[in-house]
Amino acid sequence: MIFTFAKNFFKVYKEFRKISVVVVTGCTDGIGKEYAKELAKTKMNIVLISRTQSKLEKVAAEISEEFGVKTEIVRADFSNGQSIYEDISKHLKDKEIGVLVNNVGVMLPRPMKFGEASEFDIWSHVNVNVAAVLAMTKLVLPGMVSRHRGAIINLASIAGTHPLPLMGIYGATKAFIDDFSQALEWEYRSSGITVQTVNPSYVSTNMTSFSDLVHKQNPAVPTAATFVSHAIATIGYTCRTSGYWIHGIAKHTVENYCPKWLFMFAMYMWNLLLLHNLKENKE
């Protein structure tokens, strides 16, 4: 039987839920945690991969108690790069991975020029935002191909649509994810594997907590729970989405009606405003 996510998303997994496993990276809060919770509703077991042991244990217990599924945790700091994947591979060995959510990500602590970014900022963006998507996909893809079923969900960002002054590293890594994910979907679209790219705008998570302008919940800045409840409903309907209707309007407008220079100018001014807001809050 060919496995696909379609209109009957939750029904499709009924046959496989006792043996299929969901793997979520960067899952102890925010978007990753909500994806883990939503997918646990399908009664598939969950493997949580993140860097903080205490948070992993807490989230694993919450999900297991609330949804009655088995949870397994793997402590891994993706900023450490290649060295972590041998251990992750051991944990995933012999598991039937049904869904991989490549959510783990980092962002600069505030808007800044490239010269102000630390060496850690640079390499964490490469190791976490870029290499983790490639390495985790490489680990689970062979099994999905052999079984002719599975889904890979890659979290990119509207920030990768055009170059993003004062957040250039972040935007560039998200553009990489978007491009890679679309290429992967094209390569494996006839293999029974669903690949979806998700390009959100601002979501109220720890990553946006540096400024109330992008963190305080409003119609354009949903909570992680609200965002994921909308985004997960698009699996099987589209291979590329913003996940949330207001973000979708913004993404469509930027891609089709906003010249690159205008986007760069607007985002440069916006990031300057965020910096000003941050300075005022500190004072």
Image (cartoon, rainbow, N blue to C red):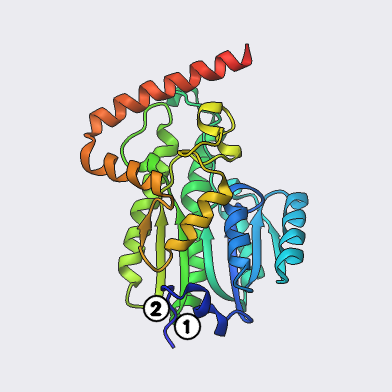
Could you classify mark 1 by the number of other residues whose Cα lies within 10 Å: few (under 14), some (14-19), or many (20 or more)? some
The picture places residue 212, in percent across and down from the top left corner, at: 56, 27
Q: Check whether the beta carbons of the residues at disc 2 and disc 1 lie within 8 A of each other.
A: yes
159 to the left or right of 277:
left
Give the quadrant of the C terminus: top right
Residue 40 in sight from this viewpoint: yes
Query: Which mark identifies residue 192?
Result: 2
Work out whether residue 90 or residue 49 is closer to the camera in this orientation and state it.
49
Give the answer, above or below, for where 67 lies relative to 174: below
Helix, strand or loop at disc 2?
A: loop
Disc 2 to disc 1, how far (Cα)?
A: 8 Å
Residue 134 in sight from this viewpoint: no
Q: Residue at x 32, y 61 (%)?
A: 183
Could you classify mark 2 by the number of other residues whose Cα lies within 10 Å: few (under 14), some (14-19), or many (20 or more)? many
Which-is-in-front pick, marks 2 and 1? Answer: 2
The residue type indicated by label 1 comes to Arg
The residue type indicated by label 2 comes to Gly
The picture places residue 22, in percent across and down from the top left corner, at: 59, 68
Residue tagged 1: 147
